[in-house]
Image (cartoon, rainbow, N blue to C red):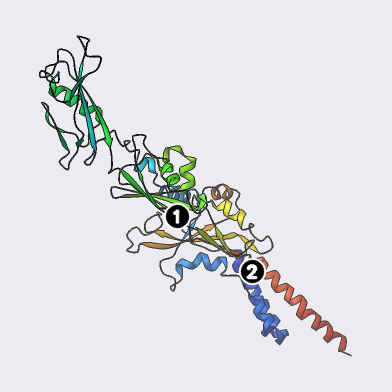
Amino acid sequence: MVLEHADSSEQVIEGYMLKNIGLGLSLLPLLATASACSITARSGPSSQAVVKADTNPSLKGITVVDLDRNAIARLAKINAVATFSETLGNASPVGTIVQPGDVLEISIWEAPPAALFGAGGMASKTSQDSILPDVSTTATLPELLVGLSGTIFVPFAGTVPVAGRSLREIEVDITNRLRGKAHLPQVIVRMTRNVASNVTIAGEVSHSTRMALTPKGERLLDAIAQAGGTTQSVNRITIQVSRAGQVVSMPLDEVIRDPRQNIVLETGDVVTALYQPYSFTVLGAAGRNEEIRLESVGITLAQALGRIGGLQADRANAKGLFIFRWEKAGNLASMDATSTNDRIPVIYRIDMSNPATFFLAQQFEMRDGDIVYVSTAPIAQFQQFVNIIASTVLPLVAVKNSVQP
């Protein structure tokens, strides 16, 4: 919900301060110097100024949104991360699907009496000692290279398409083609060489390499291990897999924790380990002001508040916690979906005085580049004013009274 009003209590206190600052100046010209400047000193804009940012003509395009249940639901939907298992899925292990460049060995068994592959035939041999009368005969063809046409030639079976087919499918096809020609034929197809099936591993690994795939079905973590592991901490690494024009990225920590994301790799996959030091910045009346690093898997607002030491109890405005972020146009219902800009500046307002907000904070995901700002409470500004009056005006008044006759 877009905010339409400011905190009235802040307006009242600030008005009171300005009124009394004027009174102080009329009583004591010294307040026009450094002391007067310190009265209105802030660590940043007031809560009222932030809330009214969308009405400021010099700040066009800003949208201010209350962080509520609806906003959390919309953010969860648009921030859903594409996973390896859902987007890419498991590839078929190499050796089960034939591709151009593979080399096949074909063995054909023929029951006695052998009609095609018997004694005197092509490269034939008996499967048992030759003195036995009723034994099967085996013919092993020379290695066959699958060319660009995706076919091989088998004597008496003709040209057989093999590219994109499993070894079992090829066996059945050749067997059917030999029926009626050979006596009870049986066929076994074996892949002897697979020089074209590799994946590339690069990025933040000990050594970039190409890994040959085998019928075992090498998985994503096998590729990382083959490259000697990552050179950075696991929770700082994002893994990117490129396959057939698709590019999908996930935190390595999440791949390790979820076995479904450890997918079987496919020929031509490119696995890249990316070091991405995500961070957000904290300003204002927070426990400390600095840039805070976060893991590639992300952290929630609740965790972020813990890392910054929470809010300053004596200065922070509990209703004035803000997250400054760039969102894609149309991500939230309150944004202009027809905007021509790729990104829109959005300010999320979080009311930490509401107990329900602590549950929402556990669901709000922090993003790289976020700015967390905690505004100063109006009462803190007023207290500062009172302290200055007490420490500056009152002692001088007492001096004046003491010198009067």
Under mark 2, the amino acid is Ile
Closer to the camera in the image, 222 or 126: 126
Is residue 104 shown left or right of residue 310? Answer: left
Report which quarter residue 164 is drawn in.
top left
Vertical order, 266 against 403 (above or below): above
Residue 151 in the image: state x and y as whole percent.
16, 36
Closer to the camera in the image, 338 or 139: 139
Residue 261 in the image: state x and y as whole percent.
42, 41
The residue indicated by pointer 1 is: 204
The residue indicated by pointer 2 is: 13
Kindly tell me whether residue 218 is visible in this rendering.
yes
Under mark 1, the amino acid is Glu
Is residue 385 shown left or right of residue 106? Answer: right
Disc 1, SS = loop
Disc 2, SS = helix
Mark 1–mark 2 distance (CA, rounded to whole Å): 55 Å
